[in-house]
Image: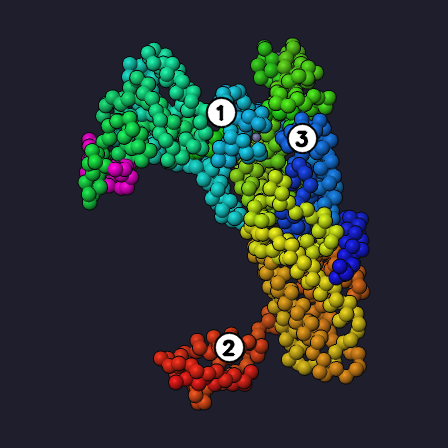
Amino acid sequence: MEKAYPFDKIEPKWQKYWQKKKLFEVDIRTSENKFYCLMMFPYPSAALHVGHGRNYIIGDVIARYKKMKGFNVLTPMGWDAFGLPAENAAIKDNLHPKVSTLNNIKTMKRQLYSWGACYDWSREITSCFPDYYKWTQWIFLKLFEKGLAYKKKAFVNWCPSCNTVLANEQVIQGKCERCDTQVTQKDLEQWFFKITDYAERLLTDLDKLKHWPQRVKTMQTNWIGKSRGVNIHFPLENSNKIFTCFTTRVDTIFGATYMVLAAEHPEIPSLVKDMKNKDKILKFVEEVRNESKIKRAALDVEKKGIFTGRYVINPVNNKRIPLWIANYVLTEYGTGAVMAVPAHDQRDFEFARIYDLPIEVVIDDPEFPLDAEIMKQAYVKDGVMVNSGQFNGMSNREAMDEIANFMEEEAIGKRSVQYKLRDWLISRQRYWGAPIPIIYCDKCGIVGVPEKDLPVLLPEDIKFKPHGESPLKASKKFVNVKCPKCKSKARREIDTMDTFVDSSWYFLRYISSKLKNKAFEKKNIDRWLPVDQYIGGVEHAILHLLYSRFITKVFYDLNLIEFSEPFGNLFTQGMIIKNGAKMSKSKGNVVSPDDLIKQYGADTIRLYTLFIGPPEKDAEWSDRGVEGSYRFLGRVWRLVDKIQMSKLKIQNKSKIQISKLKRKMHQTIKKVTEDMEKGFHFNTAISSIMELVNEIYLFNRDRHYFSGKIVSVPILDEAINTVIILLSPFVPHITEELWEKLGNKPSILKEKWPAYDESLIEEEKITIPIQINGKLRSKIEASPAIDEEALKIKVQSDEKVKKWVEGKKISKWIIVPKKLVNIIVH
Ligand SMILES: [Zn+2]
Ligand SMILES: [Zn+2]
């Protein structure tokens, strides 16, 4: 195939030029007009495919556009380089994770370069390098000092395939986020970050994030899961123990006919130790614990339970109610003890029917009084209080407050707020991560590694064994240390940190990536952050974005920084799919950019990626679409090559033709600028530039007045220059080349983004008389360029015309373009 234009010569030329000229390096000491444009840094697990490309191409377009708008643009890049895939590959291929990671980084760097993406590489960071993870460890110690990092034994998510624990956020529908294996539960001692201390602020500060997509804010709101209610204290019979239940429906307290404990409730063993059927109960508990929590939390889970043999006392009416253990209650939310009100909760209702537990109506339907005997389902709507002592007759909404007051007066309950958010489990039983800087001493207990001893280096002479424990455990040199406090023999923590700790602060490190004695320089950080534009996939809506907000708030509280939200604007791009599915090696639908760039050039791939659809939506990759973009760039190339360079300038163009092209040009500048400013509608911006290109071709083809004399037509030059400048953020190589060809000095990045003149945008209007059966009945205003279909619609919506044709049939349209419309009706 003949090339539409010599992209293979142009692209390497300009890539080299941009790199040499360091066009995106900024002086961090001045933040005048600053614009921090950040793409989520990649995880170097394998080569990038065109789906990944969307993130970097969008980021590059925004950076280039902002630079042309006169901003001082900071656009760094780095590598989220720790993590499991590299370690799994190490076990499989016997290749050290560091080696495979560095190989992958090299490949990806080459790919980013070949896309024409420009970064300030002088700020590159790599999270698996000691000069970075030293500071990740320092952050751990900061949290440890503040009591925000702690160790506890807990039921945790365990991926049997990855051989490690997972944070709740990494369990997707009961499966491991990384490898899709069914997650099980294990009782283990683990390190947590106390993100729950920040639940309220993480929630309320979402309101400050005006330029975040609503769906991301909604996902975070739901994940934090705040609810208001009452903690009610139920004394255990024949004991001084108290079980506290959280409920959002305190109005139903008189209808509580049993209580349920989650299988994970820590009191269960002591509670049933004297029961005859203790073994049976504990066996049941074990079974439930091994079930998937997602299944257990589902509304339609098959409900199973067992009676403990014990009773608690309902504190409002002193009724004895039996204490059960059931699969449908989890410790995740509330206290792991739930008061069951079968008349008014569907799950409790189903359970009570199975185990023949009493159902007592306490909120009645005002229209159809309820009968517990024949109820088919729980009544969950509002109603009137019954069987509820002094609260009878009240509306249940009113009773909620009254009962809560009563309980607080009687000290049997207390208003409370609950969050679904749990603490962030950060320890991993794997090698390829930042070691947790903790030492265990028999005398001193848990001791943080002193800052001067950081980093705690990952030993590199390590053996990887399949399905084994962390190789760190076997490294005596690593494990055996002296206690920093008392100098006696001690042991090092062998768990490493979740990689989401590495990525929770990387955006700060870019500002001073080479700093040796600090994680960051406060003065510069406060100048350059929050990030002005953050770009990444919506799959990070909870994990990474929530953790980064949390760490930022902790730093703010520690007076390390002056801002409490890290990302001012967030853009989440949609996925690029192929054959209806997300690109993945296992599905065999991965499109590599490398071959496509060889065949069509990087600009074509960039243009197609941006043109494929609204950038926030998922889009299907099509090879034919790539060719369309390629053809368009060929057309742009010829615009300069043939029209401009051939000097076949046209004189004596009519005033109408000139003003038409001028108008189109200003309309296009306006459209592209607005598409960039309001939500990054690259696809519609590009299509308006395509229209302008068409208009230029039409202008050129129309040679009726050509006299053979070569005369410059300023509007033609202007329109061609405008096309090239407007296109340059999207397709930087070809536009740099054309810009130079036209006799301009590179780089086009130094050009000002064009302004538009509102007064030139207004469409020219002509008046068209409208006849009905040959008699003048109305007049309409329309553009002289209006096509027939649009003209007909416009005429038919004219009030006067409507009156004349109402109830009649149009048999014929007679249209004289720009002159007259005659409608024949009968
Ligand atoms: Zn896994
Ligand atoms: Zn000690």
- Of 534 and 144, nearer the camera is 534
Residue 411 quadrant: top left
Question: Relative to 213, does residue 486 appear above or below in the rendering?
Answer: above
Residues at marks 1 and 3, CA–CA distance in whole angstroms? 25 Å
Q: Please, what secondary structure does the residue beneath circle 2 have?
A: helix
Q: Which residue is mark 1?
A: 185
Q: Is residue 55 visible?
A: no
Q: Residues within 10 Å of mark 1 (few under 14, many from 20)?
A: some
For the point 73% across and 34% down, which residue is it?
A: 102
Residue depth check, mark 2 versus mark 3: number of the one nearer the observer:
3
The answer to whether residue 368 of the structure is visible from this angle is: yes
* Image mark count: 3
Q: Which residues are magenta?
A: 376-400
User: Disc 2 and disc 1: Cα gap in Å?
Assistant: 69 Å
Residue 89, which numbered label?
Answer: 3
Q: Secondary structure at mark 1?
A: strand
Asked which colour scheme the image uses, the reply is rainbow
**382 falls in the magenta region:** yes
Q: Amino acid at mark 2?
A: Leu
The residue closer to the viewer here, 334 or 178, is 178
**Label 2 or label 3, whichever comes before in sequence order:** 3
Point 59% across, 10% down: residue: 443
Labels 2 & 1 near each other (Cβ < 8 A):
no
| Residue 797 x/y as whole percent | 44, 76
Instruction: Decide which of 221, 49 is in the foreground and name it.
Output: 49
Q: Give the structural element (helix, strand or loop) at label 3.
A: helix
Q: Amino acid at mark 3?
A: Ala
Q: Residue furthest bottom?
A: 775
* Upstream in sequence: badge 2 or badge 1: 1
Which residue appears at 50% of the width and 26% of the height? 184
Mark-to-mark CA distance, 2 and 3: 65 Å
Q: Which mark is residue 791?
A: 2
